[in-house]
Amino acid sequence: MRFRLAILVVVLTAGGLAACSKDKADRPAPQAQPAVSGSTGPLPGASGSADGGFTGKPTAPGPGASASALGHGKVLPTGTQLAETGLGPYVIGIEQAELASAGLVGAVSTGSNGCDSGSGLSKYGTPALIFTKGKLQHVKVTGVTTKTPAGVGVGTALATAKHAYPEGRELTGAAGTAWYVESGDFALLLRIVGGKVSAMEAGPAATLPFTFTGNLGC
């Protein structure tokens, strides 16, 4: 009886070992994972997802740091009042090429005496522009919409203009009469016809009065 039990135990043990060996043989062998060098963070340009993972889609770039290089690098005034230094972007001394590139002046006619002439935009009262050596020398306005900072414009009575600019002085020349106002290196000249302002001009104080009294210069 004991001999039979011993044989039975041996048979059962051998069967169990065979089953275990078969189970291990059926299992797939583990695959080696590829090594990753460097940082274990997300790839450059990958966007994060709500669960902390990454979608793998590149994010859109923001405005480039060199975007300002596309502009002119200089902001011109946009006011519509005529002062001694000019009118809005038409600043006395500004380069003609800069106004042209900004679309602020059209075709410029070449003058025989070195004074080239053009016109500004209607937004600024279509001022007459005089250039010498490629720079704005003289601005003249005849439209009624443009005013000076003191409120003087074409059609203003001479008495009112004198009251607005008491520091000015009267000029008389071949072109008639004008009220002339200096401010440092620049000046404002108000042409007078019939007791009223007929035109307003701005330019350098060194040359503006001579363009009126003797038609000299630009």
Image: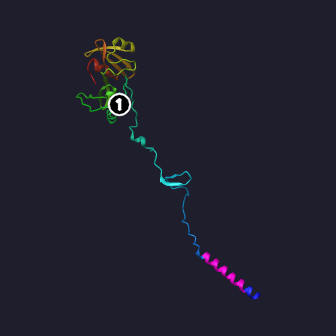
Span of residues in magenta = 7-24
**Residue lying farthest left?**
112
| Residue 15 appears in view | yes
Residue 23 colored magenta?
yes
Q: Who is closer to the viewer here, 172 or 148?
A: 148
Position of residue 40 measured from the top left corner of the image (x, y, whole percent): 56, 58
- Relative to 144, is 110 above or below? below
Q: Who is closer to the viewer here, 158 or 84?
A: 158
Determine the residue positioned at 41% across, 41% down. Answer: 69
- Relative to 140, is 166 above or below? above
Classify residue 78 by image quadrant: top left
**Residue lying farthest right?**
2
Position of residue 116 measured from the top left corner of the image (x, y, whole percent): 26, 29
Q: Who is closer to the viewer here, 201 or 184?
A: 201
In this image, 41 relative to 67: left or right? Answer: right
Classify residue 195 by image quadrant: top left
Classify residue 206 by image quadrant: top left
| Mark 1 closeness class: few <14, some 14–19, many ≥20 residues within 10 Å | some
Determine the residue positioned at 39% across, 14% down. Answer: 164
Query: Label 1 amino acid?
Result: Ile
Which residue is label 1 attached to? Answer: 94
Position of residue 73 measured from the top left corner of the image (x, y, whole percent): 40, 37
Q: Who is closer to the viewer here, 30 or 144?
A: 30
In this image, 111 relative to 182: left or right? Answer: left
Determine the residue positioned at 37% across, 19% down. Answer: 182
- Relative to 100, is 42 above or below? below
Quarter that holds the N terminus? bottom right
Residue 1 colored magenta?
no
Q: Main secondary structure of the magenta part?
A: helix
| Residue 166 appears in view | no
- Relative to 171, is 31 above or below? below
